[in-house]
Image (cartoon, helix red, strand yellow):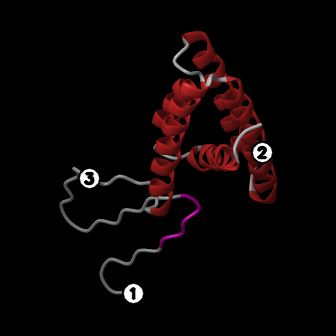
Amino acid sequence: MLAEGVAALAAAFGVAVVQAVGTDAWTAFRDRAARVVGRGDGEAARVELERLDRTAGALGRADGAERERVGLRQEGAWQAHVERVLEALPDGERADAVAELEALVEEQRRRSRTGGGDFSGNVFHGTTAAQGGQYNHQTNYFGRKK
């Protein structure tokens, strides 16, 4: 049986997976998550990549209220999966995996709070509007609004 904090981390990881799908950060998140959950084993990481791709596909096919329901199911599935993975690890490896998952989840939380976009290193000449994040609405008026 996992400690309560580790179970909460597994739940947070499920949320992070669903939040990352469809963002600019998805590919990097996906690759890192597969390595962490696959514990560095190439075959296990490949299986995790396939699982992550199925999650992205399920969320991509859903919209509106259905996407929310699919997202909740995926969060729960990832929580249960990560709990099983962590439970099967020896104590020392579990501590390392927990630390890596905490870092990955925190990174996704920061990205989610800041809108997920990365606009650094860009050069804009003239009127510009940029927006990052999910499900945003932006209306821009350059010049006079009529």
Task: Provide the residue span drawn in magenta.
Answer: 134-138
Check the image and report above or below for 44 versus 66: above
Disc 1 and disc 2: Cα gap in Å? 47 Å
Task: Name which of mark 2 and mark 3 comes first in the sequence.
Answer: 2
Return the mark for residue 76: 2
Q: Is residue 128 left or right of residue 32?
A: left
Helix, strand or loop at disc 3?
loop
Residue 95: x percent and y percent?
Answer: 54, 33
Task: Name which of mark 1 and mark 2 comes first in the sequence.
Answer: 2
Name which residue type carries label 3. Answer: Ser
> Toward the viewer: 21 or 62?
21
Residue neighbourhood size for the residue with mark 3, other residues' Cα within 10 Å, grouped as few (<14), some (14–19), many (≥20): few
Q: Which residue is mark 1?
A: 145
**What's the residue at 76%, 58% (across, down)?**
64
Question: Does 97 lie within the magenta span?
Answer: no
- Count of numbered circles in the view: 3
Q: Is residue 140 left or right of residue 23?
A: left
Question: Does 137 lie within the magenta span?
Answer: yes
Q: Are marks 2 and 3 in contact (CB under 8 Å)?
A: no
Q: Is residue 45 left or right of residue 107?
A: right
